[in-house]
Amino acid sequence: MDFNRLKDAQLDGKTAIVRVDFNLPKNDDGSILDDTRLKAAIPTINFLRKANAKIILISHFGRPNKKNDPKLSLSFVIPALNRALGTKVSFNDSLEFKDTHKIKPGEIMLLENMRFHEGETSGNIELAKKLAKLGDIFIQDAFSTAHREHSSSSVIGKILTSYPGLAMEREIQHISHALDTPKSPVMGVVGGAKVSTKIELLGNLVKKLDILVIGGGMANTFLSALGNGVGSSLYEPSFEKTALEILKKAKQENCKVILPSDVIVAKHFQANAEFRQCSPNEVLNDEMILDCGANSINDIKLALDKAKTVIWNGPLGAFEINPFDKATSETAVYASQLTKSGQIVSVAGGGDTVAALKHASAADDFTFISTAGGAFLEWLEGKNLPGIEILRKRP
């Protein structure tokens, strides 16, 4: 896509309103559990500092039910932000945005939780206008909010000239390249619990992929639709017809679908539970499918050997507990090795996906990993994202 670029913006002495994602997991004492999203914002902030811009950071945190909920204040971010930037960041807890005009070039101010403002999540235009008056340009650097029509993530971008931040630009380039101009064959790995949450994703991907691997709990619905017994496994009988329609569409689009050829089953969903490997039509009534078997893992690896581009969303099994993490971990490590050797380009995204790849110690070697969940999924579904649309060059 043809979008505005931050390097082309006039920044010297200008006030840049930057949408970041500081919705960070934290302990009760305020310490941050995972600072990945904070670190992602640092390159853009430093770029703006070097360009002598005045910087106003805006973000949400949690889902507050009332204004000024002290438990959901963004003030906890300041110490970590100061350390990461090596400079002092001021915090503005005024919902009237007082003193924002006092910022000097090169200085940074973080505003209080945007969701303390009534109308933020409904995309209130008046709130967006109020925000827009604080600055000269808008920079969207939070891909994780790009699918939301919120005042601070997309509506403001209809008022001010908008640019992607450096993190956002990387997201756009990698994901659009993998979906729109990939090297073939293109392979998708889609897992997770339910078909119902990924119908649009699967429907869009079979038009773009050469190979589609379906794993996780959602594979159970496909296996059942094909006449296999799935015992007490998680599956969605009301979506069996949908599963068959997806398989039919994949065949029409010449997209090869790989489902588990063997499975790991257990009677109890718990760590180190007694388990066995069997074919899908051998699952007993009191057993549940919790992972793909060794033959299935080998099928996926053989497919990876043929691929040039891999798009991954969702785990292949109950990766959180041993021994049902084997398919996800082994496949992730294999994909990371192929990426490192230059054989494939690998793009992954979604909360569970990131956690699964980190669990396998494979994340660092993937070409690109998006920390966004909903936005990544909606882009894969082929939807237009409001926070991306505002970045397109205007005639």
Image (cartoon, grey):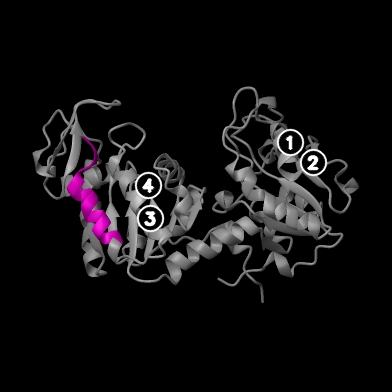
**Tag shown at residue 314:** 4
Q: Quick one: label 4 or label 3, which is nearer the N terminus?
A: 4
- Highlighted range, magenta: 289-304
Dot placed on the residue nearer the N-terminal end, 3 or 1: 1
Q: CA distance from mark 3 to mark 2?
A: 40 Å
Mark 3, mark 2: which one is toward the viewer? 3
Three-letter amino acid code at the position of disc 1:
Ile
In this figure, which residue is indicated by the disc labeled 1? 78
- Indicate which disc, 4 or 1, sits on the residue closer to the N terminus: 1
Q: Nearer the viewer, mark 4 or mark 3?
A: 3
Give, as a three-letter code, the residue at label 3: Gln
User: Could you tell me which secondary element the residue under label 4 belongs to?
Assistant: loop
Q: Earlier in the sequence, mark 2 or mark 1?
A: 1
Q: Are marks 2 and 1 in contact (CB under 8 Å)?
A: yes
N-term mark: 3 or 2 = 2
Q: How far from the left and from the top, in percent, is residue 184?
A: 35, 71
